Image (cartoon, helix red, strand yellow):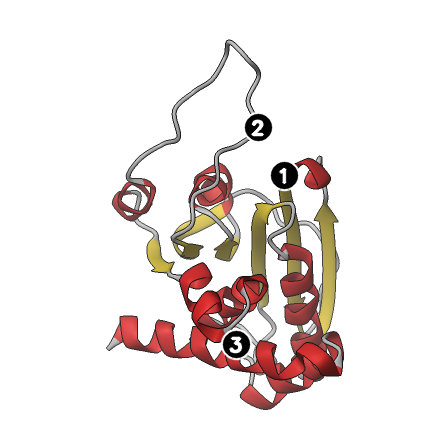
Amino acid sequence: MSAAGKKTEATTNVLMSGVGGQGVLAASETLALAAMAEGLQVKQSEVHGVAQRGGSVVSHVRFGARVFSPLIRCGEVDVLYAGEQLEALRYAHYVKPGGKVVCSDQTLEPIQIPGMEKPYPQGVPEFLTDKGYGVQVVPALQTAVELGNKRCANIVLLGALAECLDLSEASWQTAIKERFPEKILDLNLRAFTAGRHLRAEARS
């Protein structure tokens, strides 16, 4: 886990990225609620872009004893959450040297201008690892499907992200229960637990 948290004056910086429809903002809101449940100051900012058309979505989440700005500067992200691999590559320059990247293994072809198409980049996790980042690739979509609903892939990935942060299990549980309605609460609790297990297994 990171050293940042309520026991220090340090601010934890998490950048959360994906494309429209992947639930990045729901995951971001859940993280913010978990940090608030710890009694921490939280600042959050988001950019929707052309999310409705499958465009890039990014959310900055900062929490700590005192937080003054909602935006994270390039090179200061502790952990990058990426809903698919191109988004991990797109925002990797925000990650601090030696920082962590928690990335879905999913790949989604971006919208391209006819006549200017470019191939989807290959070997993204290996490239980021070579740059010195700690990279974990998570089968978030596959795990969500196994749980019964592909729409909870964002929370599977959030569970993996949680293993990188100094927030208590109780705070995460509180946040999930606050963020999701009763009819999908159990699904998201199971998705979060599954994501935590995936991260723990990868570290063992």
Residue at 59 percent across and 76 percent down: it is: 188
Residue at position x 73%, y 75% from top? 179
Question: Is residue 40 in view?
Answer: no
Quarter holding residue 177: bottom right
Q: Earlier in the sequence, mark 2 or mark 3?
A: 2
- In the displayed structure, 26 sits above or below 2; it is above
Quadrant of res 20 = top right
Pick whichever of labels 3 and 1 is earlier in the sequence.
Answer: 1
Give the labeled residue for mark 3: 192
Most extreme residue toward the bottom is 170
Query: What is the three-letter code of the residue carrying label 2?
Result: Ile
Taking depth in this image into account, of 177 and 102 the one nearest to the observer is 177
Which residue is denoted by mark 1 in the rendering? 54
48 vs 117, left or right, is right
C-alpha separation, residue under disc 3 versus residue under disc 1: 24 Å
Residue, x 35% and y 57% (percent of image)?
Answer: 137
Q: Is residue 77 above or below residue 130?
A: below
In contact (CB < 8 Å): disc 1 and disc 2: yes
Local SS, label 3: helix
Decide: marks 3, 1 in contact (CB < 8 A)? Answer: no
Q: Residue tagged by mark 2?
A: 111
> Which amino acid type is marked by label 1?
Gly
Nearer the observer: mark 3 or 1; the answer is: 1
Q: Distance between the residues labelled 1 and 2?
A: 7 Å
Give percent across and percent down for residue 4: 52, 72
Q: Nearer the viewer, mark 2 or mark 3?
A: 2
Q: Distance between the residues labelled 2 and 3?
A: 30 Å
Residue 116 position in % (x across, y down) = 50, 12
